[in-house]
Image (cartoon, rainbow, N blue to C red):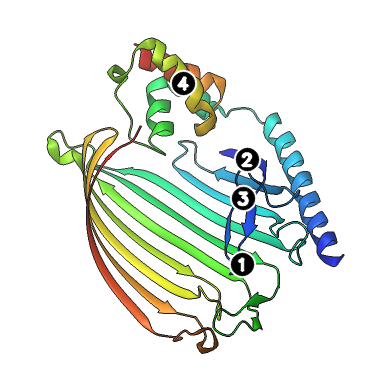
Amino acid sequence: MKILNRNLIIMSAIVVITTVSAAILNSCTVSKKVESKSGAQLWAENCQRCHNTPSPSSFSPEQWETIGMHMQSRALITDKERDKIVAFLKQ
Amino acid sequence: MKWSYDVAISNGLKLLPDGTLENAGITDNNKNKTITARIGWLPLSNSSLEIGASIMTGKVGDAGTATENLTANLYGLDLNLIENIKPFQLNIKGQYSVTDVGHTEFINPVDSSSYSFTNHTTTGYIMGSLRPTLYKSFIKNFELAVRYGNYTTPLNSIWGTKDNSLAVGLNYWLSWRTVIRYTYEAINESSRVSTDLGGTPGSVTKSNSMYLQFSIQL
């Protein structure tokens, strides 16, 4: 019973912390410093955190659109940041 | 500054007869779900540093057995730093995690008696890599990497061990996702299996390996 209660407390704490964090995070706006960055700069900063950055010529404009949507959730970037990066890569 | 968060619910982990855990996969061993959550903090505007903390908790025992209500809690801390120090690109990654599983009895394979241990496992690693990305010639394709890892499993368990590993590697990137790796790795493995379980506590096994790998990331 004690173990059950402890688990219930842990799980409840996770749910509460996550919900509160999500609410706070969703209310945050992108800082001006990030918003003023170019697509090239955002591409260099966000992609290389996890992997080598392929050159823009590595994929077609249509492929970059799909890659942009796929990688957005992994890199945790905003729609605006993704659009800037994809626009730069499609040039 | 940025924050990131992840939450997941899954079938989770399954407790094996020796006290180790494995993924339950599609065929679940109980009706309980495991909750996983991670929060990441990127304090710098160029997102070059990320510090993360994570937790996983859930019941791991088979349904209808004495371990049905046994819980496993896993906690983790991770770090990722990528910094351009002209003409190099420096990458430091690290992770430390702890696994705690509730108390239960196990069967000694030597004499079939029951025994128990504190099911506490820690594992961690830190690695650094350096790549001269701003050189124009082929030199920019080289990457030097060093990794230190530690893996400590429960004392007096049948799988008790304390491993320390050190690896040094030289990579050559043929393209952004194709690499040839040459790695030297030294591992020191110290046994934590008690004599009652047929082990020799403190006995050390040393191994040295060299790898030549070709990898394409798809």
Provide the residue designation for mark 3: B24
Question: Any mark on residue B5, and which?
Answer: 2
Q: Residue at x 52, y 85 (%)?
A: B194
Three-letter amino acid code of the residue under disc 2: Tyr
Looking at the image, residue A52 sits to the left or right of residue A3; the answer is left
Q: Are marks 4 and 3 on the same chain?
A: no
- Work out how far the residue at label 4 is from the one at label 3, CA to CA, in angstroms: 33 Å
Mark 1 or mark 2, which has the lower sequence index? 2
Provide the residue designation for mark 1: B17
Q: Position of residue B134 (x, y in %)?
A: 22, 36
> Considering only vertical position in the picture, is A89 above or below B196?
above
Q: Are marks 2 and 4 on the same chain?
A: no
Mark 3 Cα within 10 Å, few/some/many (few <14, many 20+)? Answer: some
Question: Any mark on residue B90, and which?
Answer: none
Where does the C terminus of chain B fall, quadrant-wise? top left
Q: Position of residue A11 (x, y in %)?
A: 77, 51
Q: Are marks 1 and 4 on the same chain?
A: no
- Work out how far the residue at label 2 is from the one at label 4, CA to CA, in angstroms: 20 Å
Q: Residue at x 34, y 54 (%)?
A: B128
Q: Position of residue B88 (x, y in %)?
A: 25, 44
